[in-house]
Amino acid sequence: MKKIKPAKVVVLRWGHRSRDARLTTHIALTARALGASGMILTDIADIKLKRTLAQVIENWGGVFFFKMGIPWRTALKAWREKGGVVAHLTAYGENIQTSKVIQRIRATGKNVLVIVGSQKVPGDFFSKKISHFNVAVGNQPHSECSSLAIFLDRFFEGKELDRKFERANLQIIPRTHGKKLVKKDKRRKDIHTNLSLAFPVPMPKIYILA
């Protein structure tokens, strides 16, 4: 039987402002830690965020790409043209608990671009021409970071929490009590090639799954 590659998830952060720097950083760290393959910061460049992610990957390992400065319409058009699906996180969408929206997204077998807005998003985001799915992590106001975390955990069914991050310089060893941190000394040369500075940059390769 032909082995099918698992679908990949990429986060698209829209509406980032300078005052959102801390929250956008947390969204990127959440995406990386909970199974996403990368993040696209649209319409703006944030060099400090890029450096923070580079340092995290240097220390904690794994592969995670970061693109920034790409116009959101360009990013979404490229994703959809390659056959990927788009899921928009919004309190107005289908409730992740009371509907089968996650199962329907997973059943497409396609890579998923998750829109995580900052300020009030364009009305087009709710339409079929932009988003295949509008997903609500509950229908009450709360942080977009918590919405992303719960979405990723439901999508990957908890398996992302057992993921191995290769080539890490730091590794936490789980313990019942106390703390244990293993430190290594390995320099990585691939990080900055995966963390692009600004538009124009190539979109990541998207695998279309049968």
Image (cartoon, rainbow, N blue to C red):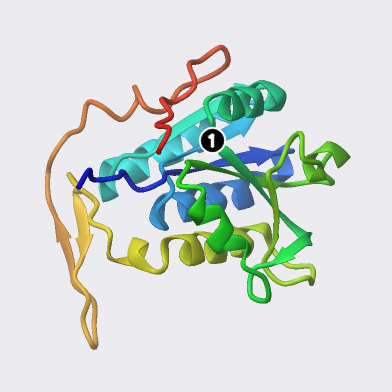
Name the residue type under label 1: Gly
Does 20 sit above or below residue 191? below
Instruction: Name the residue rendered at 20%, 32% in the picture.
Output: 188
Does 161 sit above or below residue 51? below
Give coordinates of residue 37: x percent, y percent: 41, 42
Q: Which residue is mark 1?
A: 84
Instruction: Name the residue rendered at 48%, 51% in the picture.
Output: 31
For this view, does 10 lie left or right of residue 88?
Answer: left
Instruction: Name the residue rendered at 81%, 41% in the picture.
Output: 127
Give coordinates of residue 6: x percent, y percent: 35, 48
- Residue 65 visible from this viewpoint: yes
For this view, does 105 lie left or right of residue 195?
Answer: right
Give coordinates of residue 11: x percent, y percent: 55, 43
The residue closer to the viewer here, 150 or 118, is 150
For this view, does 81 lie left or right of residue 203?
Answer: right
- Residue 16 visible from this viewpoint: no
Where does the C terminus fall, quadrant-wise? top left
Q: Residue furthest top?
A: 200
Q: Residue furthest bottom?
A: 177
Q: Quadrant of residue 42?
A: top right
Give coordinates of residue 70: x percent, y percent: 62, 22
Q: Quadrant of residue 207?
A: top left
- Label 1 crowd bin: few (<14), some (14–19), many (20+), radius 10 Å: many
Instruction: Name the residue rendered at 35%, 25% in the picture.
Output: 192
Label 1 element class? loop
